[in-house]
Amino acid sequence: MRRKIAVYPGSFDPVTNGHMDIIRRASGIFSEIAVAVLVNPHKTALFDRAERMDMLQRAVTPWPNVRVDAFSGLLVDYMRANGITVAIRGLRAVSDLEYEFQLAHTNRILYPEMETVFLMPGENYVYLTSSTVREVASLGGSLDSCVPAHVAQALKNKFAKCY
């Protein structure tokens, strides 16, 4: 059987249980998954690259075929440099579809060998976003069903510094 490597790119600021659901299911489909943290200098993240990578690394330990990496710039450049031809994208709701459709077609124009595979998270995570998690955390809400325990603690620590 031919090894098939895929990348699951995102900001993961922070990683949520929805992301984890996608990673878990993708790890059973592909030989190897590179969960790649996007470093975007035009956006201000709550957690820096190293913090996001550390949270992800701790979260993906159950899957030996999943590794954590980081990149900046175009996803297609990262994929070419790493010999990856499949990108995994999560689709939560119909509202994600148009943006993801445009992105997939643009990426294919830039890298014709690329395929995009869309996975839908479980129904418990359809409306779960990193921004919602950050907002709940900033207001002191419970994150037990939203993020891994170590991520919930990191969020509590981050927002404790704000008060």
Image (spheres, rainbow, N blue to C red):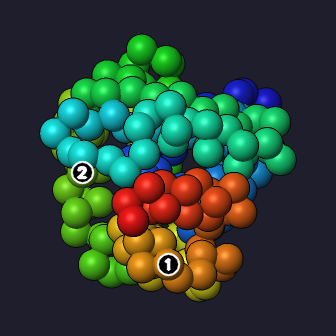
Q: In the rendering, at what x and y percent does residue 75 appear?
A: 33, 33
Amino acid type at mark 2: Leu
Cα distance in 3D space between marks 2 and 1? 35 Å
Q: In this view, does 101 lie to the left or right of 37?
A: left
Counting from the top left corner in percent of width and height, residue 120 is at: 53, 71
In the drawing, does residue 11 fall left or right of residue 143? left
Most distant residue in the top direction? 81
Whole-percent x and y of residue 102?
Answer: 20, 56
Label 2 with label 1: CB-CB less than 8 Å: no
Residue 62 falls left or right of residue 17:
right
Q: In which quarter of the image is the N terminus?
A: top right
Nearer to me, 160 or 122: 160
**Please, is residue 136 above or below residue 115 in the view?**
below
Identify which residue is drawn at 81% across, 36% down. 64
* Residue 108, above or below 82: below
Residue drawn at the location 42% of the way across and 14% of the way down: 81
Whether residue 25 is visible, yes or no, is: no
Mark 1 lies on a secondary structure that is loop
Is residue 82 something one can see in this rendering?
Answer: yes
Q: Which residue corresponds to mark 2?
A: 103
Within-10-Å neighbours for mark 2: few <14, some 14–19, many 20+: few
What residue lies at 60% left-to-right and 76% top-to-bottom?
143
Q: What element carries label 2?
A: helix
Q: How crowded is mark 1: few (under 14 residues within 10 Å), some or many (20 or more)?
A: few
The single residue placed furthest to the left in the displayed view is 42
Task: Say what amino acid the circle numbered 1 marks.
Answer: Gly
Foreground: disc 2 or disc 1: 1
Report the residue marked by disc 1: 140
